[in-house]
Image (spheres, rainbow, N blue to C red):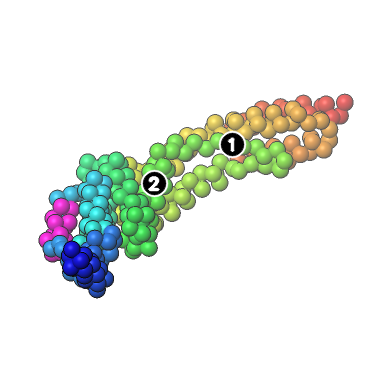
Amino acid sequence: MKILKLAAIFVILAGGIFLALNWNSIFKSSKRGEFGEEDLINISEKCEEIRSAWALQSGWDEGLYTAQRRDIDQSKNMGMFSLQGYETVNNTLRETVANKTCEGYKSGLHKSPFSDAFLQKQYKGVQTLMSAENMKEDIRIKEIIKLHSLYTNINKFAKSSHAITPKFKQDEADWISFASAQSGILAQAKKYRDDPLFKEMSSVPGFQDALNESKLRSTTERYRTSFYEGLSRQIISYFDTVEHDQTHVQLLNNIYQRFVGQANGVGVEAIAMYLVQMRSEANS
């Protein structure tokens, strides 16, 4: 009995020593997130699997990206990658998806029939890569961000009615002329046309016409009459609120002279009649 106890103690001690000496080699692969010395996955096959799946896509696919990212992360946590193997597979995913998504966005700008929804989907992929893969400094991503910013601005510009409305600034007794407002619209269109990136989206339906200077001038010119009629009403409405003395008569007279030089007769008669009334009241 004593011999059996001694033998048991010996076995326990020997086992403890064996575990202590071989702990790392026995349990290394089970530690979450720790890289092994060898890959337990065929790296070449995994990379080809990633590339082949994306080759079938026309651009960003959130479901495919999420599944592949989850698969890589789970394998990493299970210790199935060496450091080099993980970096190879991980970079394959990042590069493949970035190329496909950025190419998808650019092709979407020339797609026929054009689809804004497709373009927005590609940009969503770019945003995902920026955050999930920390790729905001990637040159491909930066280019798409610039393209999308220009696309968004031109799209908004193209959908605008370009209505030019007056605003009489009472504190300054001043306003932005119709010609100045119209010039601002034409200048903005020219800025978009001259942008080096515009060639990438010049075929988007409606963009060429929306930025055409002669068409823009014709579109905005329709608002000239209503602009000066409205401005005339605003001026008269303001002077209804002030004392009709010589100071304000002189101020309205100055405004009238400037107004006449711009309005081509529109709204002029209403101000002229009001000015006569003010003079009469100021002299009484």
Element class at badge 2: helix
Image quadrant where residue 76 sits: bottom left
Residue type pointed to by label 1: Pro
Estimate the x, y position of residue 161 in percent, counting from the top left. Answer: 44, 36
- From the image, tell me which residue sits under label 1: 166
Estimate the x, y position of residue 104 in percent, counting from the top left. Answer: 24, 51
Question: Which span of residues is magenta-colored?
Answer: 43-54
Residue type pointed to by label 2: Thr
State the residue at coordinates (34%, 63%): 138
Badge 1 density bin: few <14, some 14–19, many ≥20, Cα 10 Å = many
Name the outermost residue toward the bottom.
21
**Which quadrant holds the C terminus?**
top right
Image quadrant where residue 14 sits: bottom left
Up the image or down, 21 lies above or below 117; here it is below
Q: Nearer the viewer, residue 159 or 124?
A: 124
- State whether residue 143 appears in this view: no
Q: Nearer the viewer, residue 133 or 35?
A: 35
- From the image, tell me which residue sits under label 2: 152
Up the image or down, 144 lies above or below 22; here it is above
Estimate the x, y position of residue 256 in percent, counting from the top left. Answer: 69, 37
Estimate the x, y position of residue 57 in percent, counting from the top left. Answer: 18, 49
